[in-house]
Image (spheres, rainbow, N blue to C red):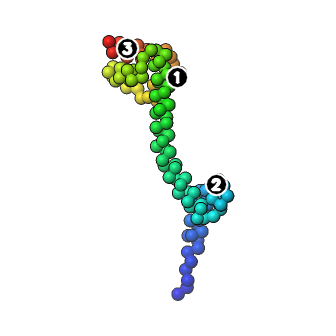
């Protein structure tokens, strides 16, 4: 029987890896073994950091809401608790947007919260 080397398949695999690590420096983009390591690490970081990005955004929104609450002399936790008690359903992303762009609307929300706490 003739010897089979699987050249098209292995070449395709190598091309796929090298294309994925195209921007890496030095041998990381040229040598197949180091390119595979680079690709695996990059994919792991990408997976991990998709989760981290969500955490970082939530922290940013909370910081913005806290700053706006301080301007209206109310604490962040009291503000969120008051929103829950008054059954106002706004996520932190939207609250941060309102706090940053529309001071009048945010002051109305604070007023509603302060009335419900009494």
The kind of secondary structure element at disc 3 is helix
Q: Is residue 86 above or below residue 57?
A: above
Q: Is residue 105 visible?
A: no
Identity of the residue drawn at 47% across and 32% down: 59
Identity of the residue drawn at 46% across and 23% down: 66
On the image, the x and y values in percent for residue 35 come to: 59, 60
**Quadrant where the image shows the C terminus:** top left
Identity of the residue drawn at 56% across and 61% down: 36
Q: Quadrant of residue 113?
A: top left
In terms of sequence position, does the residue under pointer 2 or pointer 1 come before the other?
2
The kind of secondary structure element at disc 1 is helix
On the image, the x and y values in percent for residue 46 come to: 52, 49
Q: Which residue is mark 1?
A: 100
Q: Mark 2 and mark 3: span between their CA atoms?
A: 55 Å
Q: Quadrant of residue 10?
A: bottom right
Q: Is residue 36 above or below residue 90?
A: below
In terms of sequence position, does the residue under pointer 2 or pointer 3 come before the other?
2
On the image, the x and y values in percent for residue 70 come to: 47, 18
Q: Is residue 57 above or below residue 66?
A: below
Would you say the residues marked 2 and 3 are in contact, meaning their CB atoms lie under 8 Å apart?
Answer: no
Q: Which residue is mark 3?
A: 114
Q: Which residue is mark 2?
A: 24
Q: Residue furthest right?
A: 26
In terms of sequence position, does the residue under pointer 1 or pointer 3 come before the other?
1
How many labels were placed on the picture? 3
Q: Mark 2 and mark 1: span between their CA atoms?
A: 39 Å
Would you say the residues marked 1 and 3 are in contact, meaning their CB atoms lie under 8 Å apart?
Answer: no
Q: Which one is nearer the viewer's eye here, 83 or 76?
A: 76
């Amino acid at each position: 029987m003739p010897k089979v080397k699987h050249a098209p398949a292995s070449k395709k695999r190598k091309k796929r890896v090298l294309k994925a690590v195209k921007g890496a420096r030095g041998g990381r983009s040229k040598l197949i073994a180091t390119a595979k390591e680079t690709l695996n690490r990059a994919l792991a970081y990408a997976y991990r950091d998709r989760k981290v990005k969500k955490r970082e955004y939530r922290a940013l929104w909370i910081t913005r809401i806290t700053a706006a609450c301080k301007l209206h002399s109310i604490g962040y936790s009291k503000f969120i608790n008051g929103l829950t008690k008054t059954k106002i359903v706004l996520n932190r992303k939207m609250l941060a947007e309102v706090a940053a762009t529309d001071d009048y609307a945010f002051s109305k929300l604070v007023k509603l919260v302060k009335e419900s706490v009494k």
